[in-house]
Image (cartoon, rainbow, N blue to C red):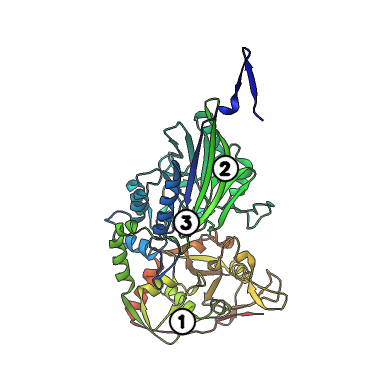
Amino acid sequence: MAIIIKDNSKERDVSLVKPEQCELIILETSDLHGHVFPINYRDNEEVNGGVAKIASMIKREREKYKYSLLIDNGDVIQGTPFTYYYAKFLREKSNPLVYLLNELQYDCAVIGNHEFNYGMEVLQAAVNESQFPWLSANILHKETKDCAFGSPYFIKEFDNGLRVVVLGITTHYIPNWENPNHIVGLTFEDSLATAKKWVKFIQANEKYDLLIVSYHGGFERNLSTGEPEEDLTGENQAYEMCQELEGVDILLTGHQHRMIADAVNGVTVVQPGFNGQALGKVEVQFEKIDGKWAVRNRAAELLKVNDLVIADNRILKKVVVYEKATQVWLDQPIGSIVGDMTIHDAREVRLGDHPLIEFINYVQMDASGAEISNTALFDDHSVGFREQVTMRDIVSNYIYPNTLKVIRITGQDMKDALEKCASYFMLNENGDIQVNPTFMEPKPQHYNYDMWEGIEYELDIRRPIGERVVKLNRQGTLIQIDHEYEVVMNSYRAGGGGNYNMYRNKPVVKEIQIDMTELIANYILQRKTIYATCDHNWKVIW
């Protein structure tokens, strides 16, 4: 029913006065991890993901709306042989990921934890080449306390006067994982506390119509119930942000590789998976009230890449030179394997000693001089090494740019770590062994199950968690709880990554500042022929 206002005895129907309105879409990518071409580098088969396919979706969405904002939420310049080859051999050229983000006219990007993996020189060059601001309000120069990468937030003003603020925040857990040489001179402030500080500052000092926090971090609690879904270490604080950041309209998240389009406590939240599998989208409808834009409605969704999405060839042509060089490098022969070092069942690898795991541990021990080592089978897609080994085989099986550390731990630390490993398994109602759901949700964490060389041990999954290490020897002699041992492991684990808290702040005996992929390649190149061996020094009982 129309509202009738009487003015000097004249009637006018205000329902005929249409209020000024507009629509804005916020598009989010996160955890692209260097995926540009829609291929799997293990075999070059096509996959539904990557920047080229996402670019087609971005173009389509922009054509539908007059106003848009495109944000990358972090972990973009690292993660594939494509980015690894650039960082190792093509640094004199522009960073290909930044080049493409410039081409796609991103409005801003947030620093992710993996941005540091190739070192500060590569990261700083990427920032300098960008035609958009990088944000991270809580990564500061240690001495000056200034933001290490540009500004904490930026404002985009559109031609209709609409003003949008984007505040960038990064998980502050980076020092627990990253090579210390890559973060020299930086300090990482608490994500939640920093967000609170800057939201208050923005509210007091800026004029805006929409406030977005883009947080390279995820949800530590169930979105519906608030119950913890992981150890509350502070690595992921998105749920707390939704509860405690007053006045935030939209929270863009990442880091956990989840698919989320929802609302928590009135805050619209998005997380678009990883490797370019989806594009996050929030449509915001505004209406002008008393001369100011007001949010009328917000709706979040995930636009998933599928077979119908065609890769943008214009984008691919921009970086085809990088890709061709990478492919040539990947197919270089390194050496040969005598025996069977292939993987047919990832679960079987984690239930008993396997030649591939033993080989990787031997490489770590050779590079470090340590006599005890641990490593992981990082995901379920590793196929091991066939008879002829190429660089493609190496980067397909060892998928992270890890370096190594030798740390000194006690026998108790070793037992505690093995108990943590043993919690990876559980028995179902039929007595069959399976992966503990806590290692699968909110994302697969197979990389947090380690297998050791240089000790003899058995894990009995029939026993309660925390009491499963039933054998722990070194060279046939019982490991002494109070004795100290030097162990080599990747730098992520040595810093306590994966909630291996027993390793934190342990004395560092030695650091090997060469990527494991390079160490593996050098080990094979020096020997030409590698024999697949397996001493069966450990097993899982169920």
Q: Is residue 97 visible?
A: yes
- The residue singled out by tag 3 in the image is 31
Which quarter of the rendered picture does the N terminus lie within?
Answer: top right
The residue depicted at 52 percent of the width and 37 percent of the height is: 210
Q: Which of labels 3 and 1 is toward the front?
A: 3
In the image, residue 215 sits, relative to residue 331, either above or below, namely above
Mark 3 vs 1: CB contact within 8 A: no
In the image, residue 68 sits, relative to residue 433, either above or below, namely above
Q: Which of labels 2 and 1 is toward the front?
A: 2
> In terms of depth relative to the viewer, which is nearer, 8 or 339?
8
Measured Cα–Cα span from mark 3 to mark 1: 29 Å
In the image, residue 387 sits, relative to residue 283, either above or below, namely below
- The residue singled out by tag 1 in the image is 342
* Helix, strand or loop for disc 1: strand
Q: Which mark is residue 298?
A: 2
Q: Which mark is residue 20?
A: none
* Helix, strand or loop for disc 3: loop
Mark 2 and mark 1 lie on one chain; the one further toward the N terminus is 2
Which quarter of the rendered picture does the C terminus lie within?
Answer: bottom right
Q: Residues within 10 Å of mark 3 (few under 14, many from 20)?
A: many
Mark 3 and mark 2 lie on one chain; the one further toward the N terminus is 3
> In terms of depth relative to the viewer, which is nearer, 100 or 534?
100
